[in-house]
C-alpha cells in the first residue's frame, strides 16, 4: 500500500501578514499571522480559529484548566488583505533591482511584510 503524501504547495503568506479567512467558522474575520507551519501548509493567525483546550493538572496548575487558543488554519482558507482593506491573491513581479516582490493582484501594489 502506498503512503499518501500531501502536495508541496508554495506558501506566499509570511509571518506578520494581515489576512482574512474565506471559509470555516472564522469566515470574514481578519488577523495577523503569528507563525507559518510549512510542513502542514497551515498558519496560526491571532484571533482566528479559536478552540477550547482542556489542560491536565500539573505541578504548576494543580487544578488544571480550560484554555482558549488559536489552532492552525490551512493556507488555502486565507487571503491577504491589501492596502484598501480588500481580500487579494498574491502575485510576484520583478522590481528595479531585479528582486522578486509580492504584489496584491487586486491593486497591483507591493505587499510590505507587517
Image (cartoon, rainbow, N blue to C red):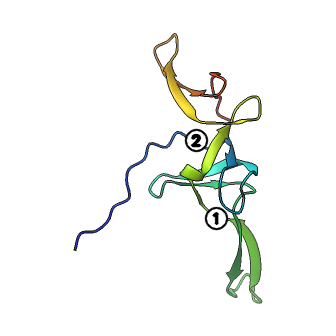
Q: Quadrant of residue 107?
A: top right
Badge 2 crowding class, 10 Å Cα cut-off, few under 14, some 14 to 19, many 20 or more, is some
For label 2, the SS is loop
Q: Secondary structure at mark 1?
A: loop
List x then y, in percent, for residue 42: 54, 55
- In primary-sequence order, the first of circles 1 and 2 is 2
Please give the name of the residue rendered at 56% of the width and 33% of the height, measured from the top-left corner.
90
Q: Which residue is mark 1?
A: 71
Instruction: List the residue tagged with mark 2.
Output: 14
Considering only vertical position in the picture, is 105 above or below 81?
above
**66 shown above or below 74:** below
Query: At x 60% / y 52%, what residue is drawn?
Result: 77
Q: Are marks 1 and 2 in contact (CB under 8 Å)?
A: no
Q: Nearer the viewer, residue 33 or 19?
A: 19
- What number is the disc on residue 50? none
Quadrant of the image for the C terminus?
top right
Q: Around disc 1, counting alpha carbons within 10 Å, would you say few (fewer than 14), some (14 to 19), or many (20 or more)?
A: some
Q: Nearer the viewer, residue 85 or 59?
A: 85
Is residue 41 toward the left or the right of residue 15 in the image?
left
Q: CA distance from mark 1 to mark 2?
A: 17 Å
Q: Nearer the viewer, residue 12 or 64?
A: 12
Query: Is residue 81 left or right of 98 when viewed as pictured?
Result: right
Give the image quarter of residue 67.
bottom right
| Residue 47 in picture, x, y percent from top left | 75, 57
Where residue 45 sits: x, y (%)?
A: 67, 53
- How many labels sit on residues? 2
Q: Which image quarter holds the N terminus?
A: bottom left
Amino acid at each position: 500500500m502506498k503512503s499518501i503524501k500531501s502536495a508541496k504547495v508554495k506558501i506566499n503568506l509570511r509571518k506578520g501578514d494581515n489576512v482574512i479567512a474565506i471559509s470555516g467558522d472564522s469566515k470574514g474575520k481578519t488577523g495577523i499571522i503569528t507563525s507559518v507551519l510549512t510542513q502542514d501548509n497551515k498558519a496560526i493567525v491571532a484571533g482566528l480559529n479559536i478552540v477550547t483546550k482542556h489542560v491536565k493538572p500539573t505541578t504548576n496548575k494543580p487544578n488544571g484548566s480550560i484554555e482558549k487558543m488559536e489552532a492552525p488554519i490551512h493556507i488555502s482558507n486565507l487571503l491577504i488583505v491589501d492596502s484598501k482593506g480588500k481580500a487579494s491573491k498574491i502575485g510576484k513581479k520583478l522590481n528595479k533591482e531585479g528582486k522578486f516582490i509580492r504584489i496584491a493582484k487586486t491593486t497591483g501594489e507591493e505587499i510590505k511584510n507587517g
